[in-house]
């Protein structure tokens, strides 16, 4: 498989991830959990979650639709790849060092989710770096 195919796969995965955010409120019991927050913090949390999902969706669409252009020698395309690599690299770091192991150790489903997302962020970073190297 070539880098274009992998970029398109990443795009589809990112779009899927963005859509998955629609399930978060029920899965994480946000109705009850967020009631303890002030109105400002509750609304800020929900707005930020929406815009994170929106940014992931738009990044996924960009990656899917413009995969060929992203590997061009164009400076804008290379900057997009650099920024996406940095974004998902930072997300990988958060997965490893911010979330407490208490959240997943000893919990089979949470452990599987932790591993799957570690692999997903690793894949995103690897593909974006590969595309960047190909573009140079």
Image (cartoon, rainbow, N blue to C red):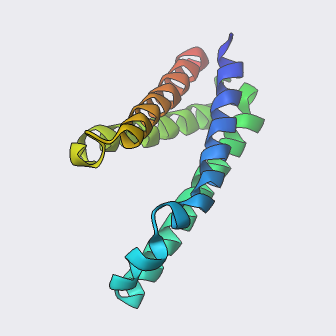
Is there any visible trace of residue 99 in the rendered image?
Answer: yes
Quadrant of the image containing the C terminus: top right
Q: Residue at x 49, y 40 (%)?
A: 83
In front: 72, or 46?
A: 46
In this picture, is 23 found above or below 118? below
Q: Position of residue 66 (x, y in %)?
A: 74, 35
Q: Residue furthest right?
A: 65
Kindly indicate the quadrant of the structure image that contains residue 10.
top right
In this picture, is 89 found above or below 47? above
Q: Residue at x 32, y 42 (%)?
A: 107
Q: Is residue 123 left or right of residue 16?
A: left
Quadrant of the image containing the N terminus: top right
Q: Is residue 11 left or right of residue 55?
A: right
Q: Residue at x 61, y 52 (%)?
A: 20
Q: Position of residue 76 (x, y in %)?
A: 61, 38
Q: Position of residue 118 (x, y in %)?
A: 40, 33
In front: 127, or 79?
A: 127
Kindly indicate the quadrant of the structure image that contains residue 12.
top right
């Amino acid at each position: 498989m070539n880098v274009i195919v992998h970029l398109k796969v990443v795009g589809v995965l990112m779009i899927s991830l963005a859509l998955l955010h629609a399930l978060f409120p029920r899965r994480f019991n946000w109705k009850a959990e967020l009631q303890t927050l002030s109105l400002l913090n509750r609304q800020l949390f929900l707005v930020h979650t929406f815009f994170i999902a929106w940014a992931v969706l738009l990044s996924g669409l960009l990656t899917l639709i413009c995969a060929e252009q992203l590997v061009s020698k164009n400076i804008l395309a290379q900057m997009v790849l650099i920024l996406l690599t940095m974004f998902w690299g930072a997300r990988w770091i958060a997965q490893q060092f911010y979330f407490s192991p208490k959240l997943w150790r000893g919990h089979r489903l949470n452990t599987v989710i932790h591993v799957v997302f570690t692999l997903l962020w690793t894949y995103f970073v690897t593909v974006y770096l590969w595309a960047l190297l190909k573009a140079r």
